[in-house]
Each structure stands twice: as C-alpha cells, then as structure tokens.
Amino acid sequence: MTRKQLLENLMLLTGTLLVCFLVFEFVIFKYILKTSDVIPNTSLNGVIRYLPNTKATLYEPDGTSHTVSINENGWNSPYKTYQKQKPENTTRIAVIGDSYVQASAVNVNEGFAQVIEQQLNAKGYKTQVYRFGIDGAPLSQYLHMLTQEALQYKPDIVVVQLIHNDFDESYRFLYGRYSSSFMKLDLEGDKIKQVAPEPYNPGWVDTLKNSRTFRYLYYQTGLAAIVRRMINKEEEGQVKPPKHGLIQSAIDVRNITELDKIRTTTSYVFDQFKALSQQHNFKLLITMDPVREAIYTGNDPKDYEANALNLIAKNTAQTKGISFLDLETAMSKAYKADKKKFEFPWDWHWNKHGNEIAGKAIAKDLELQFLQNPTNSQ
C-alpha cells in the first residue's frame, strides 16, 4: 500500500467515524435511545449548586426515568423559588446534604425531604421544607451550605442528613469535577482551619458530559458502576481484607482508618452546628443512613467497619446534646416486614421506597421532639 493510499484510507476511516458519531449524537441518542439531560453546575454567593431554572429528565440503566426541577435558587425542589419571608404560622425546615437530599434517581416530588413535608402537613402541622442538596458534598460542605445559604431563609428546624462518605471527604482533597468547590477542613495539629471553596469552573469532564453519546455509554449502560467497582477492587497482596469486604455502605473502608481524625473533624463541625442553632434560634436534628448490608443479612452492624462512622456521629451528637436519629431502626423494621431493599440494583442511592421510609422516620422524630413539644431546645 502506497503512502497516498494509506492517507486516503485514514481520511475515509476518519470521515466514517465522524458520520457515525453525528448519527448517534443527533439521531440515535436524541430520538430513539434517549439519554439523560445535562444538569449544569454553577457557583452563586460562594456556594456551588445547580444552574437555576433547569429542567431535566434522567434515564437509568433499567430504562426508567425521573425528573429534576432546579428552582430559581439552584436546588432540586418542587418550590420554584425559596422565599425569605415565611408564611404565617408555618414551620420552615431546611434539609441539608448531598445527592440523597437532592433526590438522586427519583422524581423531584419523591425525595425524602418532600416526604417529611407531606407527612407533617397530613398531621396538621403547617410545614414548609426547603432542601439544599448537591451530589458529592461532604460534611464540611454542609456547614458551608448552612452558613452561606440555608440560614438566610430563617429555618425553624435544620435537618442534616449524613451518609458514610461524608466524614473522611471533609478533610481529604479529592480529584473530581467540582470537589475543590466544596469547603474542606485542614487539620493543623490541634487546630482546624476551614479551607474556602474555589468557584466552580467547567472542565473537560463537563465537555464530555455535554455529549449524548458519552452520557448514554457511560451512565445508562451501567459502565459507570463497573468503572467504580474496578477502581475500588481489592488490591492484590493486601493484608486480609475485612470480613464483609472492602466496599461497605458504598465506601472503601480503607479510607476510614483514621478514626481519630474523623472524630476530631466531626466534633468540630457538630460544635459549629450547635453554635449556629443557638445563635439563630433553630432546632437541630442530625440523621444518618445505616449500614444497610447488615439489615439485609441480619448481621450485627458492629461487624462492619463502616458502622464505626454511625457510632462516631451518634456519640458525638449525644456528647454535645444534639438530637440524632440513626435510620437503622426504621429501615430494619421495614425490611423485616416486606423484604424490599432501599436502593437500586445499579446504584446505592435510596429508591422511592427508601426515601419513603427515611422521610416517614424523620418526620415522626421531628414531630415527637420539636412539634409536639416546641419548647424542646438544644
């Protein structure tokens, strides 16, 4: 083959691949095998969030879809805008967290924050729930979201929802699409320094996500989950792995071995939460996802390394006089009754059932602690 023929073949191949890409990008994955919409991010008032006034339909590997409705303030919520003026005789609740609060993989009205509002209103408590959640945020960012965003709406109650990757990621600096846009904690000896988040600037990953072809192949085929499992696989030659595996509650337990550092940062953030609750006169409830594997297998949660985080959160809250709810009791009772799991087969986020159980449990706890007894303070 001559050099000219080789060049012609390469040009033909390039043109063919380009045409195929254009067909998949603008025909196949737009009209036939529909792919998820993009939810852009932005930074407003120093807090990363979603681009305001964005509507999106997201598709899952099983073909189901759910809707996202980002309001004028940049949060996924049924409320088109968050009003600073509170309606008369209304209890306003701010729910702060990550993708669980954002209501990942369920419709905007099916998130547990909305379940809380529905449950309390059904019992005669005039309630308004504003949620502040963005995927990937750690505990340190929850503090930032509270001070810089949620407090301006003067909540009567603040609920902070914890999951197991919230702790070490508060001080570990991760490589990610916008992880540097989260506030972090820097431990300098016995002192803790808040590291201000950087403004969010789109990068090359955002460019990839703008492609329907990439979104379909990476997310809707389940490739994203496969990649995560490969990244988190047990290392060859590692010392005997934990009894229940390295991945527990969707975290790599090798990342939570610094329990003293986790206790220190948790204590610091909880202190800040309590001080703010006293300064701004709101009730505070911290809730946490249980080790769901223990619920499904009937094993003792204490056998799981991930459960150490539940104990740290619980003990720290009790020491500081902060109300704490581990969802283990509610989820265990529900699973014994119907054997329904709380997450998706391809994803660890709560499904609609998980959101319902969590929302009902939190609403009940709020009613008993704060609404039936409004003088209860922390």
Image: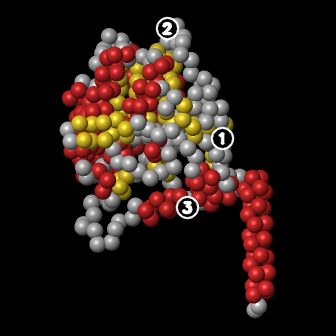
SS of the residue under disc 3: helix
**Local crowd at mark 1 within 10 Å, few (<14), some, or many (≥20)?**
some
Where residue 130 appears, as percent x and y from the top left, is 51, 25
Q: How crowded is mark 2: few (under 14 residues within 10 Å), some or many (20 or more)?
A: few
Placement of the N terminus among the 4 image quadrants: bottom right
**Residue at 53% across, 16% down:** 84
Identify the disc placed on residue 87: none
Position of residue 198 measured from the top left corner of the image (x, y, whole percent): 47, 40
Quadrant of the frame with the C terminus: top left
Q: How crowded is mark 3: few (under 14 residues within 10 Å), some or many (20 or more)?
A: some
Name the residue beneath numbered marker 3: 223
Q: Distance between the residues labelled 3 and 1?
A: 21 Å
Q: Is mark 2 on a helix, strand or loop?
A: loop
Q: Residue at x 57, y 53 (%)?
A: 205
Q: Which residue is drawn at 32% across and 10% down?
A: 375
Residue 202 lies, with reference to residue 3, above or below; the image says: above
Percent x, y of residue 159 = 40, 27
Q: In this view, does 239 lie to the left or right of 371?
A: left
Q: Which tag, 3 or 2, sits closer to the chain's start?
A: 2
Q: Distance between the residues labelled 2 and 1?
A: 34 Å
> Residue at label 1?
56
Q: What residue type is labelled 2?
A: Asn
Q: Earlier in the sequence, mark 2 or mark 1?
A: 1
- Residue type pointed to by label 1: Ala
Q: Residue drawn 26% across and 30% down? A: 317
